[in-house]
Amino acid sequence: MFEHTSWGKLSRLRRIVANDGRSLMLAIDHGYFMGPTHGMERPAEAIADLVPHIDSLMLSPGILTSCVDPAFKGGIVLRASGGNSILEDDIDNEGLILSAREANRLNASAIAVSIYIGADHQHQSLLNLANAINEAAQFDLPVLAVTAVGKKLKDKKEKRYLSLSSRIAAEYGADIVKTYYCEGFEEVVAKTPAPIVVAGGPKLDTYHDVLELCYNSIQAGAIGVDMGRNIWQSDYPSAIIQGVKGVLHENLTVKEALELVDGLIGDATRRKSKFEVTEEDIKTSAIH
Ligand code: R5P
């Protein structure tokens, strides 16, 4: 992994990928098009108990500067594509919202750009990735490509589609590809010559499902996960994140990780809900 990488880029990547070659990235960038998403209404409070257990944070520049302590030692993956909201028909009409220069100034470890293969704005999203990679090269700044599905393509999370998207991202020069897990995921990994992290997707029914997703992803060759809603929308966020960490960094089985999570469930790890959450909020936050 990263054999042909320059020292500067490698130094940044090492803040995202731990010594064991695994990566636990906490995704909290959803607000860039979903606004104050259920569970992430107050980012600083929501991440306080999670940060000690992660390798990196994936987030928007404004949430970095307003909600994250500059003493944070982990990796910082800044969202660089955007320009839309959930009020649109779909969310694939994106441009670049953050320059590599600004990301460098913010001491980012990488920038993240979404591509929407097969969507109306596929072409523009691919140019976004290409432009970001070309610009980021000047700063030895790694680029994480996100194979996004938006609203219309959300049922296309299967190996043929995900292989296509992930391979295109790698062909453009993405340093890490973030995609979804699917049946036959080994094939997606095998056909993508770049390290892969798996997105969590909408909230799953049980902790067992979440841990199994992480375990299966690693077994299939992913280097880690970039997970959001399944952590911070859960009732016990800092319990489940420790289970995920156990699977990724301590090679726990699903059963062992679940026992760990069960043992951590209690008042100390409970999510402090302060806002009314409607069925509509939950449905909206599961659109991709
Ligand atoms: C979109 O909101 C972002 O790309 C997320 O970072 C990504 O979907 C991962 O978060 P989740 O695990 O909630 O799907």
Image (cartoon, grey):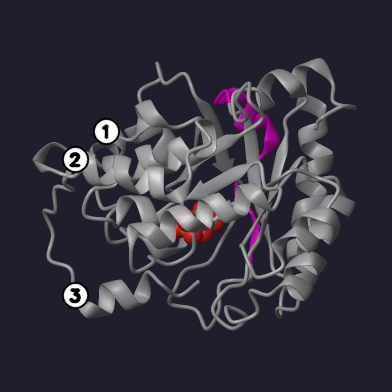
In terms of depth relative to the viewer, which is nearer, 207 or 233?
207
> For residue 49, which numbered disc appears in the image?
1
Which of 23/244 is in front?
A: 244
Q: Amino acid at mark 3?
A: Thr
**Mark closest to the chain's N terminus, 1 or 3:** 1
Quadrant showing the N terminus: top right
Question: Can residue 96 be found in the magenta stretch?
Answer: yes
The magenta-colored residue range is 94-107
Name the foreground residue: 181 vs 251.
Answer: 251
Nearer the camera: disc 2 or disc 3: 2
Instruction: Answer whether residue 185 is magenta in the image.
Output: no
Give the image location of residue 129, x and y in percent. Answer: 76, 53
Residue 135 in the figure: left or right of residue 265: right
Question: Going by the image, does 172 lie left or right of 214?
Answer: right
The local crowd at label 2, few if under 14, some if 14 to 19, many if 20 or more residues have their Cα within 10 Å, is some
Q: Is mark 2 within 8 Å of ligand 1?
A: no
Residue 117 appears anywhere in the view = no
Q: What is the total number of numbered labels drawn onto the structure image?
A: 3
Q: Amino acid at mark 2?
A: Thr
- Asked if residue 55 lies left or right of residue 189, the reply is left
User: Can you identify the residue that label 2 sits on?
Assistant: 269
Percent position (x, y) of residue 13? 68, 27
Q: Residue under circle 3?
A: 278
> On the image, which quarter does residue 119 sit in?
bottom right
Q: Residue at x 57, y 58 (%)?
A: 82
Badge 3 element: loop
Amino acid under label 1? Asp
- Mark nearer the N terminus (2 vs 3): 2
Is 101 or 148 nearer to us in this picture? Answer: 148
Tags 2 and 1 touching, CB below 8 Å: yes
Q: Quadrant of residue 65?
A: top left
